[in-house]
């Protein structure tokens, strides 16, 4: 039985736990080629380095046959529609389709046209569920277990408006029992910023006063760095950037990458002991292996 | 301007419940149609051709001020023939065609060609809206007086807002001189940078939103200029409570009129949560409180009437990620049933007000039809208010199938449409066949 992973909007605690436990099994090397004989298609309609590489490694380590389509040099570049590409991959026998696309809802649309499991690898400003899952994995490790996350406070800092990562980590952290606050100027928040029912704070300093134990920092897109949405990088860094002075008392810093050093995080924080950024990257392969195994039904075949 | 020109016959419609708020008719009566007009309304009328309408309602035909029949240029999506067929199936006897076609209807020769096609192909009375500005670009005025000579009925840059208030003001002044009404799509494109209403659903889905101010600011500009210039301005597809209130403020201070659409009266932005490109439309579906505000404005006459913004799209333009999908819904065939089901049966507005808003009021605006009176045009809609039906691709006569009501059950259905005393849409036989 296949299972799509399109969004974490309605994620339940038990679903998250299942994925993280399986990811741990992959990390410990307890799974042996669960995807042998399966075909995993990576269709990236938008440039990506770490997500694409991480999914490809995950699929190969699980023993899958991997087909990669990228923006350049494929039918995608020739203007084939998303639906037609999906139908083609479906008929070629894909068991899982890992999709990255610049428009929200692309993965949901693809899922209507294929029986293969669709894994959303990021769609526009919509969702990036595997990012949030690997974040939970890295954070659980640091906290001493998934159950240790409940009750902790996390501040999501930065461009929430344009962030698919934010739209996945907010419900994921919430489902894990954490309390979440948003830290951003109104120009980088959705107009209806109350949609999630979360507190809105005005600086990293305020987030720490609120009791944030985790600062989850979002990437500031270059095209939005200056101009109509924020006045200057200096002002942004002053109020919304994480600096060494914020790292008291076991505060953890996370970032989905790639980092703009000196903008949303000062350079000396990125690889500091408080930073989980390298752990997040390391978690990617394990979590994506688990996601692919669950999505294709291979995890249950192994279990049975 | 009518495409309708058929042999003249006599027909007696017997025992229908005749309802026309503009003339006060509301009861069972017989209606005799002759030579394209209503000849007699009374009891016990007999004729050589009779139509037994016992159990049905007879309204003045609906008039739709806003339709995209995609002609010229995208006849794969809709043609004059299919668009007018869909209109007739929805009880519409008069329709205004919008000019955002390929090419844009901005030259007298294009208007002339369209008028000729209407004469040949249209089942209903169709009126041509020419562009207000060349290429709909909001820069250079079209040759409005020549367009009018060629048969244009009004002017509009529908599909786009006018980028400059100064340009819009001149457009209104010149249209007033040319004697042409102006239909305005109010949208400030510096604010309308998204594809859905900027609310909670946009925030959660991550689909770029446009704030309500994109419509409200443009509507405010338009009504202020309408009052100042004295032009005959009609604001189309009002979708927010604030825009409706702005129109209300300028009622009596200007000649401004306004409409809203069946979808803004019946659907809300919660539908975008499923991320289905089908539900992209412009102006976007709004939250419940706007739907309520617009509905009250229609009920109270602040908004004069309903127009469908019938906007057919090929499936490949809708089966796309939400923000890439083409905006627009089919409207003709579901307008009355959707509004009857959601507004009348729900107690939000009365049946007479709905008939006034779909027939009488837009008919007055067009200056033709919209009334059921002796000597008047025999443009009528025969409706079964009890029929329950499911909207599906198979039930639609349009060449496209992008209806937001697909799969929904609706109550009330048009069973016959009469233009100039002639049946142009006829499901009566089928219906009575089922009954027998």
Image: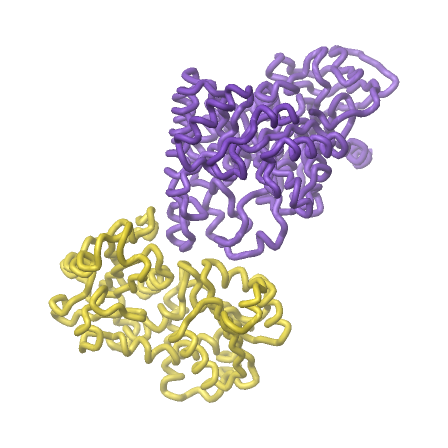
Chain colours: A yellow, B purple
Q: Seen in the image, is A231 located left or right of residue B226?
A: left
Residue at figure coordinates x 70%, y 34% from the top left: B113
B433 in relation to A206, above or below: above
Residue at figure coordinates x 37%, y 51% from the top left: B203
- Image location (x, y in percent) of residue B336: 61, 32
Question: Does residue A67 appear anywhere in the picture?
Answer: yes
A165 in relation to B332, above or below: below
Q: Seen in the image, is B205 located left or right of residue B313?
A: left
Residue at figure coordinates x 60%, y 16% from the top left: B21
Q: Seen in the image, is B28 located left or right of residue A183?
A: right
Q: Seen in the image, is A267 located left or right of residue A96?
A: left
B283 in relation to A121, above or below: above
How many numbered dots are placed on residues in this image? 0
Residue at figure coordinates x 19%, y 74% from the top left: A274
- Image location (x, y in percent) of residue A286: 39, 80
Camera-nearest residue between B302 and B150: B150
- Image location (x, y in percent) of residue A39: 56, 79
Residue A65 falls in image quadrant? bottom right
- Image location (x, y in percent) of residue B108: 63, 31
Camera-nearest residue between B67 and A12: B67
Residue A114 falls in image quadrant? bottom right
Question: Does residue A296 appear anywhere in the picture?
Answer: no
**Rendered-image quadrant of the N terminus of chain A:** bottom right
B193 in relation to B13, above or below: below
């Amino acid at each position: 039985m296949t299972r799509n992973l399109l969004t974490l909007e309605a994620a339940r605690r038990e679903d998250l736990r299942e994925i993280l436990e399986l990811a741990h099994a992959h990390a410990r090397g307890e799974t042996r080629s669960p995807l042998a004989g399966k075909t995993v298609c990576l269709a990236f309609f938008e440039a990506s380095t770490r997500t694409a590489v991480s999914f490809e490694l995950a699929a190969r380590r699980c023993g899958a046959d991997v087909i990669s389509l990228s923006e350049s040099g494929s039918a995608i570049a020739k203007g084939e529609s998303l639906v037609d590409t999906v139908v083609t991959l479906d008929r070629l026998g894909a068991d899982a389709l890992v999709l990255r696309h610049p428009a929200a809802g692309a993965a949901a649309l693809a899922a209507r046209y294929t029986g293969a499991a669709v894994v959303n690898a990021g769609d526009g400003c919509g969702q990036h569920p595997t990012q949030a899952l690997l974040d939970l994995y890295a954070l659980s490790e640091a906290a001493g277990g998934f159950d240790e996350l409940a009750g902790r406070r996390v501040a999501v800092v930065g461009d929430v408006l344009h962030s698919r990562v934010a739209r996945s980590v907010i419900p994921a952290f919430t489902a894990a029992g954490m309390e979440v606050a948003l830290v951003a100027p109104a120009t980088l928040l959705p107009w209806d910023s109350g949609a999630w029912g979360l507190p809105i704070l005005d600086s990293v300093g305020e987030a720490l006063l609120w009791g944030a134990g985790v600062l989850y920092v979002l990437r500031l897109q270059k095209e939005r760095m200056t101009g109509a949405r924020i006045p200057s990088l200096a002002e942004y860094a002053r109020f919304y950037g994480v600096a060494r002075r914020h790292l008291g008392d076991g505060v953890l810093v996370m970032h989905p990458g790639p980092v703009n050093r000196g903008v949303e995080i000062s350079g000396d924080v990125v690889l500091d002991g408080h930073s989980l950024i390298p752990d997040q990257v390391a978690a990617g392969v394990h979590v994506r292996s688990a996601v692919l195994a669950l999505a294709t039904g291979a995890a249950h075949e192994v279990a049975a | 301007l009518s495409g309708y020109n058929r042999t003249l016959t006599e027909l007696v419609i017997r025992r229908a419940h005749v309802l026309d708020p503009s003339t006060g008719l509301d009861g069972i009566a017989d209606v005799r149609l002759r030579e394209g007009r209503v000849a007699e309304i009374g009891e016990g009328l007999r004729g050589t051709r009779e139509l037994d309408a016992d159990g049905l309602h007879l309204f003045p035909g609906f008039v739709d001020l806003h339709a995209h029949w995609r002609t010229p240029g995208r006849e794969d999506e809709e043609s004059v023939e299919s668009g007018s067929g869909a209109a007739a199936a929805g009880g519409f006897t008069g329709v205004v065609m919008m000019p955002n076609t390929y090419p844009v209807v901005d030259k007298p020769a294009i208007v002339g060609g369209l008028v000729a096609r209407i004469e040949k192909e249209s089942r209903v009375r169709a009126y041509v809206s020419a562009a207000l500005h060349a290429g709909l670009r909001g820069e250079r005025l079209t040759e409005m007086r020549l367009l009018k000579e060629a048969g244009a009925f009004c002017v509009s840059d529908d599909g786009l807002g006018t980028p400059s208030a100064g340009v819009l003001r001149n457009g209104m002044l010149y249209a007033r001189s040319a004697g042409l009404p102006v239909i305005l799509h109010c949208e400030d494109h510096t604010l309308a940078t998204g594809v859905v209403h900027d609310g909670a659903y946009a925030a959660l889905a991550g689909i770029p939103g446009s704030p309500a101010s994109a419509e409200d600011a443009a509507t405010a500009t338009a009504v202020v200029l309408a009052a100042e210039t004295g032009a005959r301005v009609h604001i189309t597809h009002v979708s927010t409570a604030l825009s409706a209130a702005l129109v209300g403020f300028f009622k009596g201070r200007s000649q401004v009129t306004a409409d809203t659409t069946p979808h803004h009266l019946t659907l809300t932005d919660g539908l975008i949560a499923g991320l289905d490109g089908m539900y992209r439309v412009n102006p976007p579906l709004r939250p419940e409180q706007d739907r309520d505000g617009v509905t009250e404005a229609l009920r109270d006459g602040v908004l004069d009437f309903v127009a469908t913004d019938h906007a057919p799209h090929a499936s490949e333009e809708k089966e796309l990620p939400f923000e890439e999908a083409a905006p627009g819904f089919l409207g003709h065939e579901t307008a009355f049933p959707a509004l009857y089901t959601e507004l009348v049966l729900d107690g939000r507005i009365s049946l007479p007000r709905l008939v006034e808003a779909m027939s009488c009021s837009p008919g007055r605006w067009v200056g033709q039809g919209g009334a059921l009176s002796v000597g008047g045009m025999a443009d009528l809609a025969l409706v079964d208010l009890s029929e329950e039906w499911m909207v599906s691709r198979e039930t639609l006569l349009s060449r496209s199938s992008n209806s937001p009501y697909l799969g929904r059950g609706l109550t009330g259905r048009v069973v016959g449409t009469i233009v100039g005393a002639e049946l142009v849409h006829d499901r009566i036989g089928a219906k009575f066949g089922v009954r027998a």
